Amino acid sequence: MPPTSSPQIPFKPRHPFPHISSQTFLTFPTPQIILITLNRPASLNCISASHHHELASIWDWMDNEQSIRCGIITGAGGKAFCAGADLKEWNESNSTGKKRSQPRSGFGGLSNRARGKKPVIAAVNGLCLGGGFEMVINTDIVLASTSAVFGLPEVKIGVVAMAGALPRLVRTVGRQRAMECALTGKQYRAVEMKTWGLVNEVVEEEYTGGNNKERGEEMEEAYKGVVKRAIEVAETIAGNSPDSIMISKYGLELGWAAMGVEDGTANVMQVMEDKGVDGGENMKEGVRAFVERRRANWVDSKL
């Protein structure tokens, strides 16, 4: 088991923080944003069997911790976001007969994660292949550096992208493009994935951020490129009503999961009523702040 690393949490958490190893590096760019960095750069940030469960526990903690409003995932080292599964470990397990396991939420605890409450942004730098790409397909916003390369090379080594990507990919990019991607094992640049609708924004490598006066100089130096841009987007999200963000995300996912429009809308309205969002504290504060022409003071969501 790799040595553990304890992140400095800039607030008093309401829930015990999960065990993490040196395979994961965690920071909090702001008290409302968690940045998860896959930390095996020498192995192109490939994910081991134990790492899947570790990451799943972090995503669960994020959803349950009221202070956190948005998550970001990226890869250390600059060469790779995540090049997929640890094939050396996989080969050893094949030789010994030892079973490899993943949590129900899939590769990295993310590729098959169903209806997580809070948005996750992928900051893709370098290679994003196999299971790494499967994770990205199931994130909410994808930002990619100009060096990012995407692909599902599983068919080239006799395996299948079976961690949740295939049905999600066809819904995102369409049947023919999904078939090309999954059946050829071809690799794609970030600009092409943007034309497919899978990448929201392509970020130049030297990007140093916008003029955000609320962020200190120390943070300006600590984060660069696509990660810096991801933090800017996360800050924009975190500045909105946490109740509205989570309910909006829930409603969008109902549509993405092919629920009928009328049924999906009725479901969202029922959840808002059941959870006290309609007419709740944040909704009242948002309307009041607009009328008073000031910035809203949101309270942490209880959803």
Image: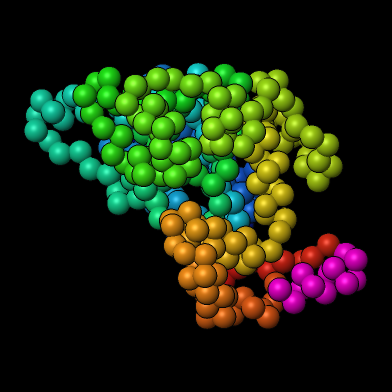
Helix, strand or loop: magenta stretch: helix
Residue at 60 percent across and 62 percent down: it is: 248
Q: Name above or below for residue 83 compared with residue 99.
A: above
Residue in the image at 58% along x and 43% along y: 141
- Magenta segment range? 283-294
Is 261 in front, or is 34? 261
Q: Is residue 266 magenta?
A: no
Q: Is residue 115 visible?
A: no
- Determine whether, in the image, residue 289 is placed left or right of residue 300: right
Judging from the image, the colouring scheme is rainbow
Q: Is residue 285 magenta?
A: yes
- Quarter in which the N terminus is drawn: top left
Tell me residue 65's x, y (percent). 52, 61
Task: Judge whether residue 159 can be spotted in this image.
Answer: yes
| Residue 15 drawn above or below residue 31 | below
Image location (x, y in percent) of residue 282: 70, 72
Where residue 150 appears, as percent x and y from the top left, is 46, 25
How far across and down, in percent of the image, does residue 292 sit? 90, 71
Q: Is residue 31 left or right of residue 267?
A: right
